[in-house]
Amino acid sequence: MKLSDKTDKLMPALAAAYEEMGAAFKTGRNPHFKSKYADLPSVDAASRPVLAKHGLMYTQGVVEGLGGLAMETTIIHGASAQFISQMVPYVVPRGKTEDPQAQGSAITYSRRYGLQSALGMVSDDDDGEAASRIARRPAPVAPPAPVEDSGPVPELTDLEAKCREMGMSPRLVEDFVMAEKGKAMNELETHEIIGLKKHIIENSDKFKETA
């Protein structure tokens, strides 16, 4: 906050204006939050006539400050040129710094909150969708740890060895498994292998190639 060297004319006028100034009407609508808020024209309409009545005016502009860019609002006592000013952050959403519409939205947003803050006006609702999007940006999620390949299932290895020992055709056994389960042998669960193993061994002749 900055003040002129003298404030003896400014402060009494501000005190009188504050006493008369009420909350701005909530006329804006934010579809993101499904709520109403006091937009910039409402804040201006609620403050400008009261300020003017007491010889006050305000100016606003984007300046360097607060570690980046800021919106500075200055309230001036016209007769004495005494002033008080303060800044609020001026934030454009990430990735939108070259977007004129985003720039305009950021200016309107910071002007409204700068004016409300400087005048001590009450505001219950917030239309800061862009600011809340930045605040709600989810933390990066660590990728799941890789699952180590534990090698072939023992039951599958045993079945394949049994088929070779009994002279069965791997192709015919694989075709049977695919027809029964709809997937390859190496995709079978342990309980599925156990269930098929008995049938394949008992009907081994059906899985042998004929000359």
Image: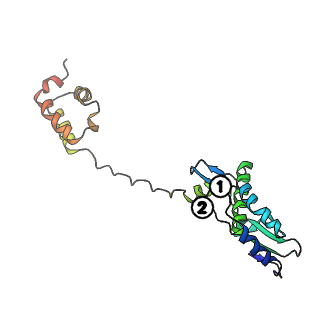
Q: Which mark is residue 26?
A: 1
Q: Residue furthest top?
A: 211
Q: Residues within 10 Å of mark 1 (few under 14, many from 20)?
A: some
Report helix, strand or loop for mark 1: loop
182 or 107: nearer the viewer: 107
**Residue located 12% across and 34% down the image:** 198
Q: Look at the image and tell me whether residue 157 can be seen.
A: no
User: Would you call the spot at circle 2 few (<14 residues within 10 Å), some (14-19), or many (20 or more)?
Assistant: few
Residue 88: image location, x then y, percent: 70, 66
Tell me the amino acid under the disc marked 1: Lys
Q: Nearer the viewer, residue 49 or 67?
A: 49
- Is residue 146 something one can see in this rendering? yes
Relative vertical location of residue 5 with respect to residue 196 in this rendering, above or below:
below
Identify the residue at horizontal 75%, vertical 58% (top origin): 45
Residue drawn at the location 78% of the way across and 65% of the way down? 50
Residue at the disc numbered 2 = 124
Quadrant, the C terminus = top left
Whole-percent x, y for residue 155 in the image:
19, 42
